[in-house]
Image: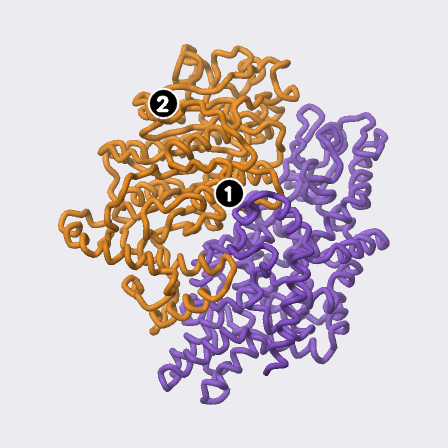
Chain colours: A orange, B purple
Amino acid sequence: MNERHDRHCCQEYSEVSRRGMLRGAAVAGLTAAIAPSWLPKVAFAQSGPTRDVLISVYLRGGADGLTMCVPYFDRNYYAIRPGIAIPEPTSNKNGKAIDLDGRFGLPQSLSQLKPAWDNGHLAIVHAAGAQNWSRSHFDAQKWMEASSRDIGVNTGWIGRHLASINEMKPGSPLRGISLTYGMALSMNGGPKSLPIPDPEEFDFGGRHRDTADMVRWIATQYAKVQDETKAAVLNMKNTMATLDAIRFRNYAPKGGAVYSDDGFGYSLKATAALIRANIGVEAVHIDLDGWDTHAEQGPIGGYMASLMNRLGRNLGAFYRDLSFDNKMGWTMVVLSEFGRTALENGAAGTDHGTGNCVFVMGGAVNGQRVYGRWPGLARNQLLDGYDLAATTDYRAILAEIVKKRLGNTKLSTVFPGYTPQFLGIVT
Amino acid sequence: MLEHFERAAEVADEIVTAASNAPNRRALLAIGGAALLAGLPREANAQAKPPGWEAAANWTSPTNRLVRRITMGIDEVETVAAVQLGFRGYLERQLNWATIDDSAADRAVIARFPRATWTLAQLWDRGEDWISLHQYRAATVFRAMVSKRQLHQRMVEFWTDHFNVNGESVGGTLLISLVRDVIRKHALGNFYDLLSGVAHSPAMLTFLDNDDNSFEAPNINYARELHELHTVGSDGGYVGRDLHQAAAALTGWTWTRDSRSPNRGKFKFEEDDHKPGNKKVMTLNIPSGGQDEGEKLIRYLADHPNTARFITKKLIRWFLGEGAPDSVWTAAQTAFKNTRGDIKAVLRVILTPQNLMAATPKFKRPFHLIVSALRSTKASVNNFDSLLWGYLPRAGMRPFDWFPPDGFPDKFHYWATAQAPRMDFVMSLGSNAVWEVSVEFERLFRNNQTPVGMMNAINTRLFGNEMSTGDKNALLAFLTAKGFVDQERLRAAVSLAMASPSFQWY
């Protein structure tokens, strides 16, 4: 980008960022000599105690937690899911579960999560969620991402977290990145947060002669307005320069990690590059769509199996990549708006339900353990007669991460009206 | 000049008044720490002006306001027509869409996107569904650009979101039979006809799994969205039991997949899959009666007062933005109920000069931004592929791509932060860098050699002469900065006009 060293515009806005750049320039020479080709030529100065980078992965559509973390010890599971249950680990059937703790198991398609589990870097909370909310995708996603049922709240929990804590790396132009076309609601309201579907391709576009002039004009005009577009455009200009310095396409994962060659794989690979580039990104949001399996769910060798395989393969690659040289300053949480009905429906699928499993991965996770009180799958234990109940409020998990790993004590701002009881998932 | 500013200030005051009456604003103030929660500007809530007010500061002409809201973007032909016909005359002309001669657009669609005009049977028999979908997407963008029935386009867009189905999920054939044969047909007609047409459409039956809803294996997906999204709204007075009862009433509603049948691709009622017995949905008792149960339910929901409430609220947001006074809502509901769902009657209540002058600015969604840029610059699009495979999907808004059944959001905050793809498009269009799309900058904007002349041409074509003063002055400065305006500089100025805050609102 031409604008990387432009110091003429968006005065008050880029001031901090410019200082960061100048400070970085002092160490740039050193970095350049040893840095791999994808690393930014302009690096920020190392600073202060670090907090974890948060990675939020959202499985849109309502992922079936009873398939993703199989409660094989509960015999009712096999009674209520005659056609789509994952066989227990000791079974000799095809697609049997991989045992985790003598009670729960992973489906074969998530086998690549096993190394993180074995190393104690992966924990699962089961029967988590929000009780008595809504079985509507839109309401459930909105309320979960906003972490509020108040209709006037249009910010997300990650956004409020970022808004209520000082910058991890002062001067960074980009604190939150939603690797989606539109901003994920979870991150809405976050300062210096942008939706960037592909961080490699982030500029003002076009083929103009006077681009530098033009970008300056645009930044000046947007600096005068008072709505959300102002920060968006000014951030964009600063972010462009920062991201432009990272050569995402040349990023070489470590430890032989292989990400899949699709949007989700690319998003995780880009996340790894962002973490290694150390530009001050504090939160990354990634979506994986397609979990609304009303019919022909295919947990073994079918539709959902291939989707889980995509999830597991890339989370596994991410773990392998960053654990290889112990770059573990991150915590990842995998959420979905709700679980699915415990009862299988007439079309070999499941409908919108309640309780679900939540995966938490990272260097400070007290892993190799399934957390949460198991509500049971007997008819009289099911919520409304067909759902896995939610015995752990999903906010308890998020709040613990926000406080212990992201260093934010303002939990009543991030999760209004909620007082969490921590489970001890992270240190 | 002073007078001009005073008028602008009055308009801005009206906007503020309207916004401060907004129910959601009251709700916000009720919560502690509302500013942070709601992501409002850091200024005090009470003084906050609505987003986009700067862009709207010079919007003093009621007919221009109408053109902005009921078209896909300012275009000289429409702004002039609105002045000639007057506010009411222009609105009536656009409401009576079928009487507007649109034969030029129709002919072009037949020539360029023939599948958009094929019958259901032709589409079915010829297959290659993805080509049909692609051509229909292209025809949708094309009509939004060039159709003279602009209000109809806006309403097609509204109902396509309201009754959203994902194009790739259902395929081109079923999508076309829904959007063209139901939504376009009834977009300015009667709500019941629209609802009923959608309920019988194979696209919706497939997308929301009602074709899987049978006696043995009930599936309440469609029944839920029928209530939550299509009619009474999520607070519309039903409970889970009502949805199960509604789903039972709709068991057996499916469509003919047999390619040898003369009814291929059409609705059918499968008696064997229907769950017999009486049902009760909210206050409606439905006697056991096969297909008629579902028909009664649709009529009941179309007539339900909460449907009038929900639909008019959404229409008001579509045309007036956030914060229109409750009195408009009340009047719109009355019109809806009195006419039993006549959409034109409701729009006449909403689209008054008074309401439009007080309305808060609306942020152009990416589709709207792109189409309005193409309209204002009279761009020729020889091939829609660069839009359909590049700019629109990157901006998150290719037609029929939205997956959840609630349709593309009509919310500023959802789109506000995704500036990169918007900038990319206008900067590319302005440098003639969009493949197979071209703009004649010299002919349109260099009406004389002076920077002021060029500035005025831009202001007229893109803003109906109501560009904000700040952006206008800055653009003039850009045009004069080098002491000459060559081709490249003129294109750059038009790009900046489209990238400016002023162009993002309507």
Number of marks in the image? 2
Q: Identify the residue shown where x is 55% and y is 45%.
A: B33
**Chain of residue at mark 1:** A
Q: Identify the residue shown where x is 72% and y is 70%.
A: B100
Q: Are marks 1 and 2 in contact (CB under 8 Å)?
A: no
Which quadrant holds residue A123? Answer: top left
The residue that mark 1 highlights is A156
| Residue B5 locus on image (x, y percent) | 60, 77
Which one is closest to the eye, mark 1 or mark 2? 1
Q: Identify the residue shown where x is 64% and y is 41%.
A: B259
**Chain of residue at mark 2:** A
Position of B231 compared to B174: left or right? right
Which quadrant holds residue A375? Answer: top right
Identify which residue, B2 or A386, lies in the foreground: B2
Task: Tell if the residue under mark 1 belongs to the same chain as the one under mark 2.
Answer: yes
| Residue A396 locus on image (x, y percent) | 49, 28
Identify which residue, A162 or A366, lies in the foreground: A162
Identify which residue, B473 or B435, lies in the foreground: B473
Secondary structure beneath label 2 = loop
Q: Amino acid at mark 2?
A: Gly
Between the C-alphas of marks 1 and 2, the distance is 27 Å
Secondary structure beneath label 1 = loop
Asked whether residue B121 is in view, the answer is no
- The crowding category of the residue bearing disc 2, from other C-alpha atoms within 10 Å (few below 14, some 14 to 19, many at least 20), is many
Identify which residue, B296 or B448, lies in the foreground: B448
Q: Amino acid at mark 1?
A: Gly
Quadrant where the image shows the C terminus of chain B: bottom right
* Earlier-in-chain disc, 1 versus 2: 1
Residue A367: mark: 2
Asked whether residue A264 is in view, the answer is yes
